[in-house]
Image: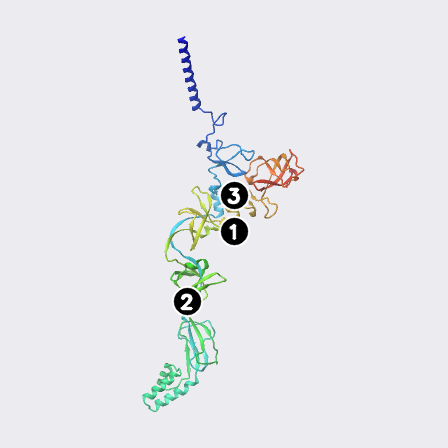
């Protein structure tokens, strides 16, 4: 009896050991992936396509591209297999790759974002004007007549000391004759000095009095000359005209110094201060630079141009500038600070935002929104959005700030469908729209599987414009009684468009009637 109990205990121990062994083997040797009872565990091997050997970023349903899946399988949205997105193709968040040949055809040129010490300056335009503080007037101090006019018309250039007009003054004859008579009669010096004082009181120039002592002949003509080299900005008399004391005969504007009036944009009005350095160039000769400092800020904002005027003085001793010239002006800031700079042509301005196209480390192009500052020469300061050393597209045919680039190129770089207003689909070119400006439509051919009051189910061919493979899916009707002649089993050509979260049919016709 005791032997039987010992035998039973030994049998139980052997059975337990056997069960443990089976459990160990089952735990360490799992079925192959994909077989019955396989456990789908995400590993690095799952991210490689066994057919092509290419690394897979994720799987997605082409009809719902925003939804990503970690493993292949059936789409929960449609009766179709999920499509892989490979690492060497990239998703919508990593930009797009452009082959070198296409880059050359597009004229793409790159530039590097760089940090540079620069002053808080800006570019503006200015106009040269006469320096009114240096204008001279030629007036008559006596009553007389214009005997000869040397200056013929306003804006005539004239040198310093050049004659302007010869003036005949009859009233000068009597005091001069009186002075000569006193001198011939041997009068004392007191009377002669009194006579000279009387002539000076009658505005007879000292030169005429000196000539009177030297020659002994009275002079009744005086020549009025230019006090400065410049132009005759005003000429108010003609030959033979009578002039009176205090009358302005001409106005001489000098050219050795000119005013430069700079038009400051209203947005920068508070940043302009007297003393800021200005570098001006003329478009006719950009190698010539004229420098100066803002002397004063003129009060008031122009209601037409919305600009504030700042005035400074330019040295024009070489007489290279004339009034009325349009100058390109750079107003430098008072303190230099480090800034990130990109070429101004690299910035696409949409009105609501500014965008640059950044070249990623793998060579892909991706649009990035940036905050821009002021222009510094041919470059623009970037306050945020890019980093020092990044590569941006500096020029290219698609960087033109136009409706085409803003509604077509940028969405395509961001991985979104192009706007229907451009008439271009992301993959196939011209959109199949019923009329200019209509909603984007697509077309294909398929077999009718099911017809209901709400929709029609097709087993249709691929739709390249949407990157759809051949599959079976349902399309909504515009109305319950629409396409009443369509029957299951028929092969139809149909046109559809996106409507809300789905797609709606716009035309269904037999394959023989397709256009």
Residue 32 in the figure: left or right of residue 438: left
Q: To which quarter of the image does residue 151 belong? A: bottom left
| CB atoms of marks 1 and 3 within 8 Å | no
- Asked if 119 appears above or below 319 in the picture, the reply is above
Q: Where's residue 247, x and y in %?
A: 45, 78
Element marked by disc 3: loop
**Numbered circle sitting on residue 66:** none
Out of 236 and 16, give the one closest to the viewer.
16
Question: Of discs 2 and 3, which sits in the foreground?
Answer: 3
Label 3 crowd (10 A; few <14 / some 14-19 / many >=20) = some
Whether residue 378 is visible here, answered yes or no, is: no
* Real-space Cα separation, disc 1 to disc 3, in angstroms: 18 Å
Q: Where's residue 502, x and y in %?
A: 57, 40
Q: Earlier in the sequence, mark 2 or mark 3?
A: 2
* Real-space Cα separation, disc 1 to disc 2, in angstroms: 41 Å
* Real-space Cα separation, disc 2 to disc 3, in angstroms: 57 Å
Q: Earlier in the sequence, mark 1 or mark 3?
A: 1
Residue farthest right in this picture: 485
Quickly name the residue at label 2: 258
Q: Which colour scheme is used?
A: rainbow
Element marked by disc 2: strand
Quickly name the residue at label 3: 416
Q: Where's residue 400, x and y in %?
A: 50, 51
Label 1 crowd (10 A; few <14 / some 14-19 / many >=20) = few
Out of 384 and 168, give the one closest to the viewer.
384
Quickly name the residue at label 1: 402
Label 2 crowd (10 A; few <14 / some 14-19 / many >=20) = many
Whether residue 307 is visible here, answered yes or no, is: yes
Out of 308 and 232, give the one closest to the viewer.
308
């Amino acid at each position: 009896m005791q032997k039987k109990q010992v035998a039973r205990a030994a049998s139980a121990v052997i059975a337990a050991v056997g069960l443990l062994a089976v459990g160990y083997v089952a735990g360490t040797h799992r079925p192959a992936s994909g077989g019955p009872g396989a456990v789908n565990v995400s590993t690095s091997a799952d991210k490689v396509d066994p057919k092509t050997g290419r690394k897979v970023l994720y799987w997605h349903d082409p009809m719902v591209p925003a939804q990503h899946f970690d493993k292949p399988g059936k789409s929960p949205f449609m009766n179709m297999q999920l499509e892989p997105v490979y690492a060497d193709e990239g998703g919508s968040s990593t930009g797009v790759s452009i082959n070198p040949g296409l880059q050359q055809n597009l004229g793409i040129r790159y530039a590097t974002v760089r940090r540079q010490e620069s002053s808080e300056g800006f570019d503006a335009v200015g106009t040269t004007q006469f320096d009114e503080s240096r204008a001279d007037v030629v007036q008559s101090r006596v009553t007389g007549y214009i005997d000869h006019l040397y200056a013929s018309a306003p804006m005539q250039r004239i040198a310093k000391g050049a004659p302007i007009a010869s003036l005949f003054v009859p009233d000068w004859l009597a005091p001069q004759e009186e002075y000569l008579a006193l001198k011939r009669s041997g009068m004392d010096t007191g009377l002669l000095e009194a006579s000279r004082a009387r002539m000076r009181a009658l505005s007879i120039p000292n030169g005429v009095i000196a000539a009177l002592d030297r020659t002994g002949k009275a002079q009744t003509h005086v020549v009025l000359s230019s006090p400065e080299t410049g132009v005759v900005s005003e000429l108010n008399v003609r030959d033979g005209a009578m002039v009176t004391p205090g009358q302005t005969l001409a106005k001489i504007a000098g050219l050795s110094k000119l005013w430069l009036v700079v038009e400051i944009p209203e947005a920068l009005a508070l940043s302009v201060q007297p003393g800021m350095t200005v570098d001006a160039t003329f478009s006719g000769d950009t190698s010539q630079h004229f420098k100066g400092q803002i002397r004063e800020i003129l009060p008031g904002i122009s209601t037409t141009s919305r600009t504030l005027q700042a005035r400074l003085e330019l040295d024009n001793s070489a007489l290279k500038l004339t009034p009325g010239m349009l100058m390109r002006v750079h107003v430098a800031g008072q303190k230099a600070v480090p800034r990130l700079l990109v070429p101004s042509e690299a910035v696409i301005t949409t009105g609501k935002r500014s965008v640059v196209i950044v070249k990623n480390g793998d060579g892909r192009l991706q649009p990035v929104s940036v905050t821009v500052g002021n222009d510094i020469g041919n470059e623009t300061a970037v306050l945020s959005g890019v980093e020092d050393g990044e590569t941006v597209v500096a020029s290219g045919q698609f960087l033109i700030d136009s409706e085409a680039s803003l509604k077509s190129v940028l969405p395509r770089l961001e991985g979104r469908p192009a706007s229907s207003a451009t008439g271009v689909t992301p993959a196939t070119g011209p959109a199949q729209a019923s009329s200019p400006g209509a909603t984007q439509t697509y077309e294909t051919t398929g077999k009718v599987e099911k017809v209901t009051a709400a929709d029609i189910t097709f087993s249709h061919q691929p739709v390249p414009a949407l990157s759809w493979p051949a599959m079976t899916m349902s399309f909504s009707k515009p109305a319950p009684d629409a396409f009443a002649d369509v029957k299951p089993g028929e092969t139809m050509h149909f046109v559809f468009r996106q409507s809300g979260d789905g797609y709606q049919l716009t035309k269904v016709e037999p394959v023989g009637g397709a256009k």
